[in-house]
Amino acid sequence: MVRTTLEGLLFDEGTNEAIRGALPEPAVAFFELVTHLGDGAVLVGLMAAMYWFGAPSRRRTRALVLAIGLLALALSAGLKGIVDAPRPDVAFGYGVYSPYSFPSAHALGAAAVYGAIAAFGELGTKRLRYAIAGTIIVLVALSRVVVGAHFVGDVLVGVVLGLGIVALVVRFRPEPTPLFALAGAVAVVSFAFGSTHYTTITTGAAIGATVVWPYASRKSWQPYGASLFVFAVCLLPMLAVLRAITVGWDFHWIVDVGAYALVMSGAVLVPGIAARLNDWESVTRLQATLPFSRRTVDPEQMPATKK
């Protein structure tokens, strides 16, 4: 009886409707906006910025954040496809989602990424970082219920899994390479059990990171902030064109794996590629005129810009 009641609360559209109905319209609008803090593109952008702009001496911990995010994606993708649970059937669902509900990828990803940033970041006090990360995680998780994308049970499990990954990594402090490999293994096993929800993407990304990180970890690249900015300005239009060309194409899974292996390899190597731009005239001008002198997200200074 207790189990039936609990399931009714955690996996019932009525709970979504009750929570949304208890909120005033401005609050609903707020949650419809804040839910995007758990979007994959936002989380990937945060992890990439933290890795690229982190102090060279702390690049290993930044790679751990990347590995945590990749493992969270692999776990979410695998469980979604294997469990194959439908989403809530509510009238106020406003987005176009995949058909899979359990667990909430937004909740799992937000818990893993914001939790990892709080655990491995250096800015501010640890208490402040955890308070900010915890607030964002709660808001993202609740927003998925408010917008009708997930049941309460979906987001609770997602948060527990995401924070569990972070807690284990903080406790044992493994090297990034085994974590990247584990993410790939989870994705491969999930694919073998019939899950095709982002598992090929995750497999490719994990392969790329596993192969390239051992090389990158031995380097002490020190790109200027302006170098990273100029490189991004050159790279993003090309990625946008590639994305526009490939939208709607149904590639073989081998192509997916290979493509995302190359993308992830490139992302890990960005600091090294950007460092080669340090002597460009446009870069030195930007470094001298824009606020790039403190380019890192850690309290560690870069070498002085050449005059």
Image: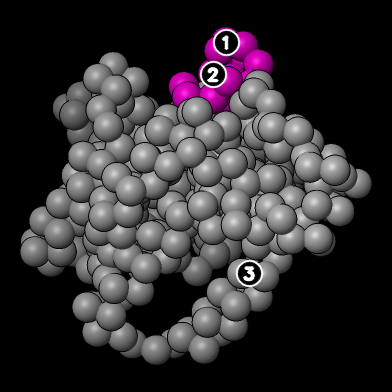
The residue depicted at 19 percent of the width and 44 percent of the height is 182
The secondary element bearing badge 3 is classed as helix
- C-alpha distance separating marks 2 and 1: 5 Å
Disc on the earlier residue, 2 or 3:
2
Q: Residues within 10 Å of mark 2 (few under 14, many from 20)?
A: some
- Residue 135 vertical placement versus 187 (above, below): above
Front residue of 111 and 206 = 206
Q: Position of residue 47 (x, y in %)?
A: 51, 44
Q: Position of residue 53 (x, y in %)?
A: 61, 41
The secondary structure making up most of the magenta span is helix
The secondary element bearing badge 2 is classed as helix
- C-alpha distance separating marks 2 and 3: 32 Å
Q: Position of residue 225 (x, y in %)?
A: 70, 46
The residue depicted at 57 percent of the width and 10 percent of the height is 127
Front residue of 86 and 56 = 56
Q: Which residues are magenta?
A: 119-138
Name the residue that disc number 2 marks: 130
Q: Residues within 10 Å of mark 1 (few under 14, many from 20)?
A: few
Colouring scheme, one of rainbow, by chain, secondary structure, one colour: one colour
Q: Look at label 2 and name its amino acid.
A: Tyr
Q: Is residue 247 magenta?
A: no
Disc on the earlier residue, 3 or 1:
1
The residue depicted at 64 percent of the width and 23 percent of the height is 300
The secondary element bearing badge 1 is classed as helix
Q: Look at label 3 and name its amino acid.
A: Leu
264 sits left or right of 183 in the view: right
Front residue of 168 and 304 = 304
- Residue 65 vertical placement versus 239 (above, below): above
Name the residue that disc number 3 marks: 236
Name the residue that disc number 1 marks: 127
The residue depicted at 29 percent of the width and 22 percent of the height is 173
